Amino acid sequence: MKNQFKKVVLAYSGGLDTSAIVPWLKENYECEVVAFAADVGQGEEELEGLEQKAIASGASECHIVDLKDEFVSDIIYPTITTGAVYEDDYLLGTSMARPIIAKAQVEVARKVGADALSHGCTGKGNDQVRFEGAFAALAPDLPVIAPWREWDMVSREDLLSYLASRNIQTSASATKIYSRDANAWHISHEGGELEEPWNAPSKEIWTMTVDPEDAPDKSEQVSLAFEKGRLTKVNGKELTPYQVLVELNRLGAAHGVGRIDIVENRLVGMKSRGCYETPGGTIMMKAYKALECLVLDKSAFKFREQIGLEYAHVMYDGRYFTALNDSLLAAANSFAQLVTGEIVIKLYKGNATVVQRKSPNSLYSEDFATFGEDDVYDQSHAEGFIRLFSLSSRISYLNKHAK
């Protein structure tokens, strides 16, 4: 492997895995390592001192790219318009961040003249597919080094021993039992007691939201205004897409909104168990769907549901940079042009409940829907509709009972 590459750009988080990858790449490939980190809203505490840590572990330089606004505006908002939810529960928090991170990593690689890319994804997970699928679409000329598929280290203890033998400092320890991934949309938790599905998650699992049992006894209402599928105001205040998400995360987290505990099907074939916290995203998805229910007719909403089901797999499986992705987003965006209006949601002890809704494009008509007297609907017309709607059933019966 030595002298195969001159300069490698590594997706670097400063965690145990990537801290070990920097010296490992230098030793095994004798290459220069450039660290790359993406700020996708994971929090300042995760980015603090990251550049110094990367340099101390052997990287020649470290590029930290601010992608927060782009992530929310260009990835999260369009995904909301599709209604995508993976396996009925997962709001795709980790999945959504990967395309924009991979794209920025390729851009850094081009900028510094790198001849290879690297990441710290394991051979068991989805992220290796998501990153390398994006690399294949954006930079197929750049080979990818995946140390977890090459080295002989197999445990957290192995990595700690490796770093200690080289006098490289790390804040990680053998007692850390949870694997977490955070960004502006969510935080995920895996490992520890969660590896046994019969174990209920302990209070230590959750780090973003208040336990619903400890949430305020008084509910809180939040108003959300949409313009052509874009959430533009929260409680009457105009905010940028990223500011909207920050504010809704704050409001939702205080009421314990957005917790799920699921066993999901990974792309690589195995099942995994994880806990996810998506407070702001849960509120946004509920509000968006409530507006769709006002403005889309039955056939349109049925098709949008099909888009959401398919797009959940496209995003989860790392197929963002594909023609199918573009086609689904374009279809969803055509429906989103009608999604204008206001939704009021009540937050209370882990629940986000739609209580008010209005839209200038609403197809709901009280005149037609009322149970009281009306002048617009002749109920006798329903007889002919039902007869034609069920005509095939009548014919089928006649065929079966023909003498």
Image (cartoon, rainbow, N blue to C red):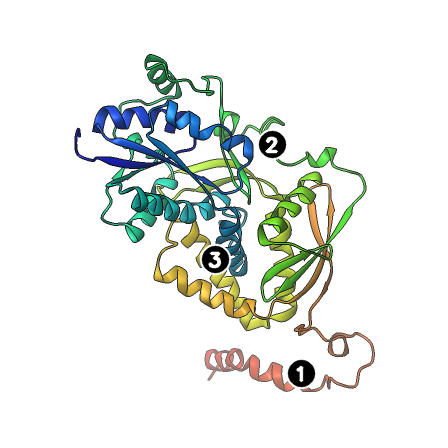
Residue at the spot x=37%, y=17% of the render? 168
Which residue was labeled with disc 3? 309
Q: Which mark is residue 76?
A: none
Q: Where residue 94 appears, x then y in whole percent?
A: 47, 43
Judged from the image, the secondary structure of the residue bearing numbered disc 2 is loop
Seen at 41% across and 54% down, the residue is: 314
Q: Is residue 5 above or below residue 385?
A: above
Q: Amino acid at mark 1?
A: Ala
Residue 207 numbered mark, or none: 2
Residue 394 at what x, y percent from top left?
Answer: 53, 81
Q: Is residue 10 found left or right of 178 in the rendered image?
A: left
Q: Earlier in the sequence, mark 2 or mark 1?
A: 2
- Is 62 situated left or right of 256 in this image? left
Q: Crowding near pointer 1: few (<14 within 10 Å), some, many (20+)?
A: few
Residue type, numbered disc 3: Leu
Front-most of 63 and 347? 63
Q: Which residue is at a point 24% across and 23% down the rendered structure image?
A: 27
Q: Earlier in the sequence, mark 3 or mark 2?
A: 2
Evaluate if marks 3 and 2 touch, with contact meaning CB atoms under 8 Å apart: no
Relative to 275, residue 164 above or below: above
Amino acid type, residue under disc 2 in the picture: Thr
Q: How many marks?
A: 3
From the image, tell me which residue sits under label 1.
Answer: 382
Q: Cα distance, mark 3 to mark 2?
A: 29 Å
- Using residue 403 as the reference point, say whether residue 143 is left or right of it: left
Instruction: Specify which label sits upstream in the sequence, 3 or 1.
Output: 3
Decide: is 303 above or below 131. Answer: below
Cα–Cα span, label 3 and label 1? 33 Å
Under tag 3, what secondary structure?
Answer: helix
Whole-number angstrom distance, CA of label 2 to CA of label 1: 54 Å
Of 202 and 381, nearer the camera is 202
